[in-house]
Amino acid sequence: MFQYKVHQVLPNMEYGDAISNYALLLQQTLRRLGFQSNIYAQYIHPRLRRNTIPLASMSRCAADEKIIWLFHYSIVSDITRQMREMRGRVVLLYHNITPPDLSIGGENFFSSKLYAGLQDLKSFVDIPVMAVGSSAYNMKQLESVGFKRTEILPIILNYSLFDRAPDPAIMHRFNDGMVNFVTVSRIYPHKKIEDILRVFYYYQNLINPNSRLFIIGDSKGMEWYYDQLINFHHKLNLQNVIFTGRVRFRELIAYYRLARIYLCMSEHEGFGVPLLECMYLGIPIIAYNCSAVGETLDDAGVLVNEKKCGEIAELAHLILSDQDLRTRIINKQKDRALAFQPDSLISRLQKILALAAQ
Amino acid sequence: MPDAFEIRDKAINVDDLMERIRTSIDNKKKSQIYIEEPWMMQDITRPHTGMGTQRTADMLAMLRIAGRLDLEGEKITSHRRLWGSLIVALKRITRFWVRRYTDAIFFKQNHFNLQIVDVLAQMNQQLNEVKQENEQLKAHIAASGAGGSKPDDH
């Protein structure tokens, strides 16, 4: 097995991005297991240059058959074409592509990129020796596209990063006794941020006006949807709703530390990394039950099957006010979070590599 | 039919929680403070101006964003450890001198792009007005034809 090197390939190594962090953690785990392991990427954030090699250098290894290439797939890119030229064994690590019809009308630039991603994936079916989904939901999607040999390898998280000190300025500014709700995601239509605003409207107007909502995430590429959300939030006349935009990691930790409850009303999640983060940090989760959300939470958190905003807000109030209920939910979530540490997944990773090497 | 909520921890009594929630909502309804306005539940990704109009508006918004040329360009970086600083310096000098010639052209292009989008937006608005007028006229004709006199009557 150790005669093989195991390298990872992905389009972008972005600082703070979930897939990039996962790639770094996977690299550490692979090296601990004794494998020679590099990461190749098209775009490399300056802070990640120490850990990543430019994609152009990958061609030097094209003829080497003793390489297992872990190809992270979440967006269409030229890498698919380059992977065809590799003599080594390609394993697709699939992080999910949002169905194009969940973005606006399926006829805009973002939708076309999603559609192109799915077509690109279909064209790639014959190349990898195995396709690995980060959840059973993703694995089923791979099978529906035509991949024959599939496995599951959940995303792992380096929880120790979240033990770092939070941003002091944000803690000072918002640690004022208000009840803070939080949601973390890209500002994309399928994330249904407007449903979170509706739930918060009910909570703030009919239960507790002394409350605040942090909406953390980047709206780049979806500026029109962001405008719609701002208009909607003004129409609802909500107070203390903060759209933070993209935040630095220590700022994210600060918002998490201030949060008393996490809401997720997204209608499509391939895995849901923020759910893991909240489970570890002890923030009770209320999440809409769709795609891979139920699988990621398993028996932790609270799953919502119907978006009745009044009932969800009342449930949030119960979780915030009933200490016994709150403690039970948090403890269950912390147990569940342990399933996503590197050590918990080593055997599964080794099995996948062994199968790939056959 | 699935329950509204699922809490898979068997130690938590979901029925009891639902009962408490429903009681609270009922009390608010009785006090007439529970308000559900239809507009609050509208799909905000589809404002009610018609699908075609919204699609054109989205495309105009995207054109406006795409039409803005970023004159600064990508950040100049180099992944090389030893020669990186020198490469970055050379790239910066090159960009400086190239921009002395190209900036004027890009400014003009930028201006043109934004003007074109404005013109398209105006044309789109005029088209919508004409469409509306057309619909009103059709409705008027249909109403006249239904209750009005026939040609043979004269």
Image: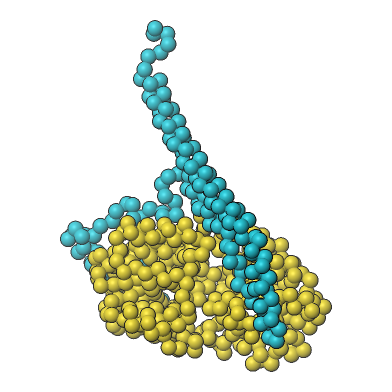
Chain colours: A yellow, B cyan
Horizontal and vertical percent position of residue B67: 57, 55
* Quadrant including the C terminus of chain B: top left
Instruction: From the viewer's side, name the closer residue of A122 and A111.
Output: A111
User: Which quarter of the rendering shows the N terminus of chain B?
Assistant: bottom left
Q: Is residue A51 left or right of residue A179?
A: right
Residue B91 picture location, percent across and down? 68, 73
- Left or right, A53 with respect to B65, comes to right
**Relative to the observer, which residue lies in front, B106 or A251?**
B106
Residue A71 appears in the rendering: no
Q: Residue at x 32, y 66 (%)?
A: A200
Does residue A75 appear in this view? yes
Q: Is residue A135 above or below residue A224?
A: below
Q: Position of residue A95 (x, y in %)?
A: 59, 71
Image quarter for residue A325?
bottom left
Q: Quadrant of residue B144?
A: top left
Residue B124 vertical position relative to residue A203 in the rendered view, above or below = above
Residue positioned most to the top: B154
Judging depth in this view, the residue of A152 and A81 nearest the camera is A81
Task: Give x and y (percent) for residue B21.
Answer: 27, 68
Would residue B81 appear left or right of A307 to someone viewing this image?
right
Residue at 61% across, 66% down: B73
Residue at 27% x, 80% y is A177
